[in-house]
Image (spheres, grey):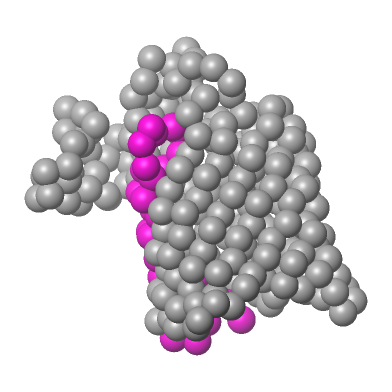
C-alpha cells in the first residue's frame, strides 16, 4: 500500500503503540476492503548532547475487522457519502492492486526503520528502512530518508512539524504539522504517492487528533481526506510512552 515508508514522531524513551485501521477504497487500479492492526515498538535514545537514534519495529495483523458497520452508521447519521462500502459484506478481506490479487489474513512483521537525528528544537533527521518481501503490505525495497523537524512555542501553544523525502522504489514527500495545547494536540498530514500516474498517484492527506489521558498514555484518531488513495480511511490508536 502507499504507506511503504512511515515517518514516526521522533521521541526519547520507549513506546508501544497500537493502531486499528479500516481500509476501503475502490478504483480502476485497485480494490481494498480490510482492516489492519498495527502494533509498533519504538525506542529513542541519546548518543551525545545533540545526537540520538530512533528505532521503529512494527508488527501487522490483517483481518476483516469490526469497524465497517460503525463507520457506515456514522456516515449515515451525518449524511456523509459511504463511497460504496454499504454495497459489500462487512468483515471481508479483499486486496487487488493492478491485477495482482494480494488478499491475505494473519500476522506479518513490518519493515524495521532506523533514524539518526541531530539538534534539539531544530533537528536534522536521516534514516533507512530494512526491506522485506514485496507483498503489498511491505515494499520489498530499501528506502532512505532525509528530513528535519522543528518546534516553537507561541502564546501557550506548541507548534511543531516534521518534513522530509524518502527515496526507494519511487519517491515520497512527507509533511506533518501539529498544534499542542495542554493534553490535546491536532494537526494535518500529507504524504505523496510513489506512483506518478493513475488512481495510485493521489497523495494521502489526513487530519489527526491526539489526547493525553494520563502521563504516558495517549489515544487518538486519524481521518483520511479526499481524494482518497490506498491508505487507511479511518484509524484509531492507543500509545504508551515512557
Left or right of 132: which side holds 234? left
- What secondary structure do most residues of the magenta stretch adopt? strand
**Residue 233 lies in magenta, yes or no?**
yes
The residue at 43%/65% (across/down) is: 186
Which residues lie in the magenta part?
A: 214-242
Locate residue 52 relative to residue 198 in the image: left or right. Answer: right
Image height of 43 relative to 108, above or below: below
Q: Residue at x 68, y 32 (%)?
A: 171
- Residue 28 visible from this viewpoint: yes
Residue lying at 55% horizontally and 77% vertically, measured from the top left: 154
The stretch drawn in magenta includes residue 149: no
Q: Is residue 186 above or below residue 13?
A: above
Q: With 120 as the anchor, is 42 left or right in this view?
A: left
Residue 212: name its quadrant: bottom left
Q: Nearest the camera: 141 or 222?
A: 222
- The residue at the far right in this view is 48
Which of 236/174 is in front?
174
Amino acid at each position: 500500500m502507499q504507506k511503504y515508508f512511515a515517518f514516526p514522531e521522533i521521541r526519547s524513551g520507549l513506546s508501544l503503540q497500537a493502531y486499528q485501521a479500516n481500509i476501503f477504497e475502490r478504483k480502476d487500479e485497485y480494490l481494498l476492503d480490510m482492516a489492519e492492526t498495527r502494533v509498533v515498538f519504538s525506542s529513542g535514545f541519546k548518543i551525545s548532547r545533540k545526537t540520538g537514534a530512533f528505532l521503529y519495529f512494527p508488527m501487522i495483523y490483517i483481518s476483516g475487522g469490526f469497524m465497517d458497520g460503525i463507520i457506515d452508521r456514522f456516515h449515515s447519521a451525518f449524511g456523509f457519502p459511504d463511497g460504496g462500502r454499504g454495497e459489500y459484506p462487512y468483515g471481508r478481506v479483499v486486496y487487488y492492486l493492478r491485477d495482482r490479487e494480494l488478499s491475505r489474513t494473519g500476522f506479518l512483521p513490518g519493515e524495521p526503520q532506523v533514524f539518526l537525528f541531530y539538534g534539539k528544537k531544530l533537528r536534522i533527521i536521516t534514516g533507512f528502512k530494512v526491506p522485506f518481501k514485496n507483498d503489498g503490505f511491505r515494499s520489498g525495497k530499501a528506502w532512505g530518508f532525509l528530513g528535519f523537524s522543528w518546534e516553537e512555542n507561541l502564546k501557550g501553544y506548541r507548534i511543531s512539524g516534521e518534513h522530509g523525502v524518502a527515496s526507494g522504489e519511487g519517491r515520497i514527500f512527507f509533511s506533518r504539522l501539529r498544534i499542542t495545547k495542554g493534553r490535546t494536540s491536532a494537526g494535518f498530514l500529507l504524504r505523496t504517492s510513489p506512483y506518478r500516474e493513475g488512481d495510485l498517484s493521489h497523495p494521502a492527506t489526513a487530519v489527526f487528533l491526539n489526547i493525553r489521558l494520563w502521563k504516558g498514555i495517549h489515544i487518538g484518531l486519524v481521518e483520511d481526506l479526499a481524494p482518497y488513495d490506498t491508505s487507511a480511511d479511518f484509524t484509531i490508536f492507543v500509545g504508551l510512552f515512557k
